[in-house]
Amino acid sequence: MAGKDDTPPSGDDSTRLIRAGGGPRPLPRTVGPAIQRGSTVLIARAADLYDHSSAPTYGRAGLEAQAALREALAQMEGGCDALLYPSGLAAISGVLLALLKSGDELMVSDGVYNPTRRFCDVVLRRFGVEPRYFRPDAAAEDVLAMISPATRLILMESPASLTFEMQDVAAIVSGARRRGVTTAMDNTWGAGLVFKPLAHGVDISIQALTKYVGGHSDLFMGAAAVADPALAATLSDSAWDIGWSVAPEAAYDMLRGLRTLPVRMARHQESGLAVASWLREQPEVIEVLHPALPGAPGHALWARDYSGCCGLFGVVLRPAPTAAVHAMLDRLRLFGLGFSWGGFESLAIHCDPQFDKRRFRADRGGPVVRLHIGLERPDDLIGDLRAGLDAYAGR
Ligand SMILES: Cc1ncc(COP(=O)(O)O)c(C=O)c1O
């Protein structure tokens, strides 16, 4: 134990074993950070017990592995810090709880992830914060025209993770800034890699690391990256006050995922575009909702702002009963049916049951299926989807 005499006064094992093996020793350097498991942090000198300025004094603040992940995420996002939260939803709720107070209004894209909407409608309303929704593909001036004196924050999600509408982030942000309104964006689709919210002026770049950064469908975590140290302190204080923390093993695994993110994203992009382009040609398909596909909704904004894309997109099918959608999804062998995305595996869901909460319900002309294209061989996935579409068409 640093700074203490380890010799038990009585030579008794119960005292000896409490301290045995705890001598300070320099850590050999490995490629990954040390996984320090600790709620207690031992402070060498009594005079430093309440000095929280240079190092954590309690493990909930995060130790070596969490610090390494924060630093790496901040570098990827081009920010000064990236706060960690136990899930993507916790990162979103954490940002909103840190910045909003009773009487404030929050503007939210109507295409937002459903649990985010539920947090706004159920929890924030209970605390006197009013969410107001804007069309997920609204022109920036229409979004800005909704700002009232009570508007404190604008939360974007672009593209929307079920229907893939894009927001003109830079135009919304510059108008919001002129009016003194803070902006935040759920950038899980961009993964902090193919779109850089902070470089486009967004104040807080949020993502569910659970998806692409984790990459293996077995971890939960969220991050909020910022460029302004004062904002970082506000978010950090609030996360501390609420009591959130992230385990060192999870931070280590997340950092491991980050190392291969660019390689995996390139493959998701290439395979996703190949499958999306093929789907466009199929007679059962009305439209493919993939902003990186030329001619698709939101493509101009994607082409202006993005350096790439991920493997998540939507498909609008020709009208048919829900039973046909179920027949298609049940025929798929390589696509699992599951709500997450960003892992190595391909997934599919039927989206329509999630649309009833939306304020603006655009009729897309037929049922919407969302696909996540994993790291499998694209031709195998195409064969699987062809069989699914046969089932859809009753063949
Ligand atoms: C766009 C988006 N944001 C946030 C989340 C929440 O992430 P988590 O499941 O880690 O809370 C999800 C999860 O599906 C998502 O799709």
Image: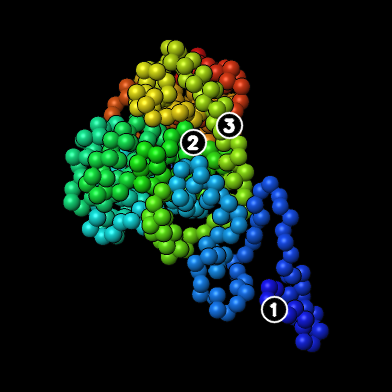
Return the residue at label 1.
Answer: 4
For marks 1 and 3, the one nearer the N-term is: 1
Q: Quick check: 252 above or below 300?
A: below
Residue 318 falls left or right of residue 264? left
Q: Earlier in the sequence, mark 2 or mark 3?
A: 2
- Which residue, given by chain and number where applicable, does mark 2 sit on? 193
Mark 1 near mark 3, Cβ–Cβ under 8 Å? no
Q: Quick check: 77 above or below 40?
A: above
Task: Kindly identify the residue that appears in the image at 71 percent across and 52 percent down.
Answer: 29
Q: Is residue 7 visible?
A: yes
Quarter of the rendering containing residue 21: bottom right
Q: SS at mark 3?
A: helix
**Cα–Cα span, label 2 and label 3:** 11 Å
Tell me the quadrant of the picture where the N terminus can be found: bottom right
Amino acid on which disc 3 is placed: Arg
- Rate crowding at label 1 as few (under 14), some (14 to 19) or many (20 or more) other CA atoms within 10 Å: few
As shown in the figure, which amino acid type bears the numbered disc 2? Leu
Q: CA distance from mark 1 to mark 3?
A: 48 Å
Element under disc 2: loop
Q: Amino acid at mark 1?
A: Lys
Is 270 situated left or right of 186 in this image?
A: right
> What secondary structure is found at the residue carrying circle 1?
loop
List x then y, in percent, for residue 297.
Answer: 34, 23
